[in-house]
Amino acid sequence: MSVLPLVFTSGWASGINAYAVVLLLGVFGATGLTDEVPASLQRTDVLIVAGVLFLCEAVADKIPYVDSVWDAVHTVIRPVAGAVVGALLAGQSGSLSDLAAGAIGGSTALASHFVKAGTRMAVNTSPEPFSNIVLSGAEDLGVAGIVTFAMFNPQAAAIIAAVLLAAGLAILVFLWSRIRRFLRRRAQHREEKRLAAQEREAAARAAVRPR
C-alpha cells in the first residue's frame, strides 16, 4: 500500500502542530500500533523532546499575540518537520521516493501553516482571549484525531485533511481584511514603542545637560 496518504496527512498536521505529529507517530510506532513509523521517530530522546516542545506550544498557542509570534518562529520549522517526517515515512515504506515524499510533506505543511498563522492573525483582532483558547484546543484535537485515524484508514484521513486544508485556504481569503488590520495594528504598536523610546532618550539627555 502506498504511503502517500499518510505523508499528506502528516504534512497537513505538521503545519498545525509538528511536535504533536512527531510525538503521536513515535508513540504509535513504539507501542506496535503500526509498522509504518521508522525507528528514528520512536527513540526515547525524540519522544521526550517532542513532548516537552508540545507542552510549550500548548501554552504559547493559547495566548493572544504570543501565538502569532510562535507561528512566525515556526514558519520554517513546521514545513521542515513535515518534509522530514514525510521522507522518513517513505523510507520506511519504500513505496514512494524520499525526495517526493519530502516535497509533498513540506509543501502541505507550509500551506496548512499559513492557514493556521493567518487565522490566528484574524482572531487576534478580537479583544477577548477565549477564541484563541477554543481555536487552539480544536486544532490540537483535530491533529490528534486525524493522525490517529490515519493509522487505521490513511486514505480516508488524507481526504479529510485535504478538505480541511481547502476549507482553511478559503476561510483565509475571506479573513484577509482582518489579517491586514492585525498587521497594521502591530506595525502601529511597534512605531509607538519606537517613538516612546526616542522620547525617553531625549528626556534623559535633557536631564543630564548642564544648565
Image (cartoon, rainbow, N blue to C red):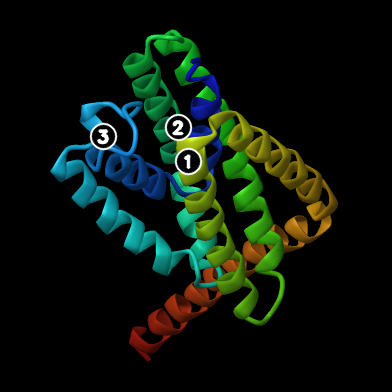
Number of residues whose C-alpha sits closer than 10 Å to that of mark 2, classed few (under 14), some (14–19) or many (20 or more): many
Where residue 156 sits, quadrant-wise, is: top right
Give the residue type that dot 1 points to: Ser
Q: Position of residue 112 (x, y in %)?
A: 61, 41
Q: Quadrant of the C terminus?
A: bottom left
Number of residues whose C-alpha sits closer than 10 Å to that of mark 1, classed few (under 14), some (14–19) or many (20 or more): many
Q: Is residue 198 left or right of residue 180?
A: left
Mark 2 vs 1, N-terminal side: 1
Q: Position of residue 82 (x, y in %)?
A: 45, 32
Q: SS class of the residue under badge 2?
A: helix
Q: Position of residue 88 (x, y in %)?
A: 34, 22
Front label number (2 vs 3): 3
Residue at 39%, 50% (x, y): give it: 20
Mark 2 vs 3, N-terminal side: 3
Q: Mark number for residue 41?
A: 3
Front label number (3 vs 1): 3
Number of residues whose C-alpha sits closer than 10 Å to that of mark 3, classed few (under 14), some (14–19) or many (20 or more): many
Q: Mark number for residue 82?
A: 2
**Picture layout, residue 102 above or below residue 24:** above
Mark 3 vs 1, N-terminal side: 1
What count of labels does the image hold? 3
- Is residue 106 visible in the rendered image? The answer is no
Give the residue type that dot 3 points to: Leu
Residue at 78%, 61% (x, y): give it: 178
Q: SS class of the residue under badge 3?
A: helix
Determine which residue is flagged by label 1: 14
Mark 2 touches mark 1? (CB < 8 Å):
yes
Mark 3 touches mark 1? (CB < 8 Å):
no
